[in-house]
Image (spheres, rainbow, N blue to C red):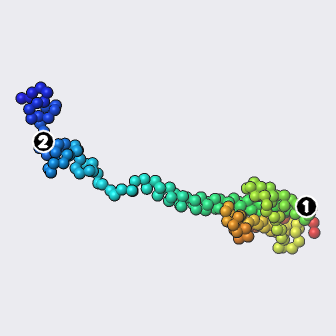
Amino acid sequence: MRRPGGAGGNAPGGHARRPGGAGGIAPGGLLRRPGRRGNAPRGHVRRPGGDEGNALVEFTYLAIVLMVPLVYVLTSAFQVQRAAFGVTEAARSAGRAYARADSEATGQARATAATALALADQGIDDAGPPVISCPDGPCLTPGSAVRVTVSYTVQLPVLSAVFPRRAGIPVRASHVEVVDTFQAGSAP
């Protein structure tokens, strides 16, 4: 029978002590901490010190090492693709403008303006004039072909500052436009 106050061989609260249980004195006269065996908590393995917090540092380092080149390559690829869209549209527009002109001088002026407009749509403003050739004979004769070539060199973001002459990727597009057979005015 229990006595009030926990007297008589029972632990406080009326529960009997287990021999060698949690708390108390361990063999050899050392004080035992409740719930621990040695110095490690239950279910945990003690690791050598100094390894805590390294995962964050390693993740940050690897993210920088891997992400910076990836962002650079993507930025360069996007710039080259933008220039490719620009020169393709510029060659097509310049060919159409030249083939519908009344004279070669007017056609050259229209082709240059069309090239500048098409490249400006893609954010390119420093390309040269288009190269116009007529492989089938004189330009602007009805039924003749007009070939327009537009070239541009894409300057890569960081390398162009370090290597100004070699850090570009050339982009070129050509378009062949046929002069209308029933064109009203044809110039020699």
- Amino acid type, mark 1: Thr
**Mark toward the viewer: 1 or 2:** 2
Image check: 181 left or right of 61?
right
**Crowdedness near tag 2: few (<14), some (14–19) or many (≥20) residues, C-alpha within 10 Å:** few
Tell me where residue 127 appears, x and y as whole percent.
Answer: 79, 62
Which residue: 82% across, 68% down? 131
Q: Is residue 113 visible?
A: yes
Q: Residue at x 9, y 29 (%)?
A: 2
The answer to whether residue 183 is visible is: no
Q: Which residue is mark 1?
A: 106
Is 162 or 177 nearer to us in this picture?
162
| Marking on residue 18 | 2
The N terminus: image quadrant: top left
Quarter holding residue 150? bottom right
Identify the secondary structure beneath mark 2.
loop
Q: Establish if 18 lies above or below 69.
A: above
Q: Where is residue 49 shown, x and y percent of the image?
A: 36, 56
The one nearer the camera, 14 or 115, is 14
The mark that comes first in sequence, 1 or 2, is: 2
In the rendered image, the quadrant that contains the C terminus is bottom right
